[in-house]
Amino acid sequence: MKRGYLSEYFEGVAAKRLSAVEADETRSNQHEYHATKQVQSFLGSPEEKTKIPARFLYLTDDDPEPIVEDAFLTLYNCRKGKPRAPEYHLYFPTTNVSQNASEGDLLVIAKKRDGDLLVIIAENASSIGRQIEWLFGFADLAHPGFSVKSELETEQDRIEFASRFILENIGIPVETSEDTYLDDMLSRFSGRFPTTRAFSAYARSTLKDLSPLDQPDLVLMTWMEREEILFRTLERYLIADRLSQGFTSEENAAVADVDGFLSFSLSVQNRRKSRVGLALENHLELLLKENGLRYTRTAATENKSKPDFLFPGEKEYHDPTFDPLRLTMLGVKSTCKDRWRQVLAEANRINEKHLLTLETAISTNQTDEMAARRLQLILPRSLHQTYTQAQQAWLMDVEAFIGLVQQRQGN
């Protein structure tokens, strides 16, 4: 097991597309998956029926939170006692997850290091399904049986910025830290979180010899990766410190303050969600400045809309004599989901919109719709490989976007 790879969390993973009899309870009462020899290689071949604790998840693009239910899978030899070669099946009970499953949905069964299973069903043709496929390295699931990976220490399996977020979306917390900076952060920020802008500037200051003029895609991702690690380092310390103080009622020290604990937990989650998007905007803004671009951040356009970045600025946008072909708008969203459509209603004078995201492996259906609606998607170059070849031909990277705006501004 190597730290920093999927093997740190999983012993083996199997994936397939659900058939009609596996997904539709009206078609079959068997409630079983066929455990092939490859699946047995990491689940085993027990003599007796073996119940394995499992957490079931159903994922769609429409719901920000998955459907989650704890149950089990039962591994057994359906030919036991018969003069034939063993044949193993995995029985699954009826759950909210199985009742939402449909033919063609992605099924992933992963054995965690503690021996329990993670059973993921993702809606067919969804972005989250594509992300799960990319995370575990399953490129082609057209055949009916399971594809299996038990070697999870290749370069594809290295856990980096993009894969860390997908893992956390399926309930696998990834611990990252850079403790050499902890004392400095505690002293500099007086033992609490600073503003996002201040923290972004600090993260950049810990990385020397990075020029925003040279390989802006790499620079942006390096800044984001460093800030994420430093944030998790400081967060882990501050959370541990707060938990050590306990949550008790002011009136009675022996009574647990449940509301206080829930409020603290919610604040942690909210901070995590909002910080990434703001950090991306902060680092991108410095890239734009250093590359000599003129812009207004959150400029007001029609109907109180405020694009994240407007080029060359708000003054030019509201000048009816200024050529609209020299105007550019850029939305920034760390993850898209369905929120990308919000960008379409911003800056009516600009027909072709641009959107920068860090979301991996968005479905072809979504990117086709973006292209049809004249929304150009931008991702740092290192994330392009999570998309299909056809999508990659259409995607834009940060360097190309900077070059486009420079051209329009006559730089």
Image (spheres, rainbow, N blue to C red):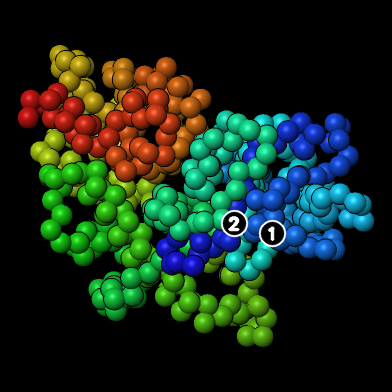
Total residue callouts: 2
**Is residue 246 visible to the viewer in this orientation of the structure?**
yes
Q: Label 1 is placed on what type of residue?
A: Leu
**Residue 335 place in picture, x, y as percent:** 43, 42
Identify the residue position indicated by label 1 in the image. 43
**Residue at coordinates 46% horizontally, 79% vertically from top-left?**
241
Q: Looking at the image, which is closer to me, 244 or 108? A: 108
Identify the residue position indicated by label 2 in the image. 12
Q: Looking at the image, which is closer to me, 58 or 43? A: 43
Q: Looking at the image, which is closer to me, 290 or 297? A: 290
Judge the density around disc 1: few (<14), some (14-19), many (≥20) Cα neighbours within 10 Å.
some
Judge the density around disc 2: few (<14), some (14-19), many (≥20) Cα neighbours within 10 Å.
many
**Residue 44 place in picture, x, y as percent:** 71, 61
**Residue at coordinates 37% horizontally, 47% vertically from top-left?**
277
Residue 203 found in image quarter: bottom left
Residue 294 found in image quarter: top left
**Helix, strand or loop for disc 2:** strand
Vertical order, 364 against 245 (above or below): above
Image marks 2 and 1: residues in contact by CB distance under 8 Å: yes
**Residue at coordinates 53% horizontally, 42% vertically from top-left?**
138
**Helix, strand or loop for disc 1:** helix
**Precedes in sequence: disc 2 or disc 1:** 2
Gap between marks 2 and 1 measured at Cα: 8 Å
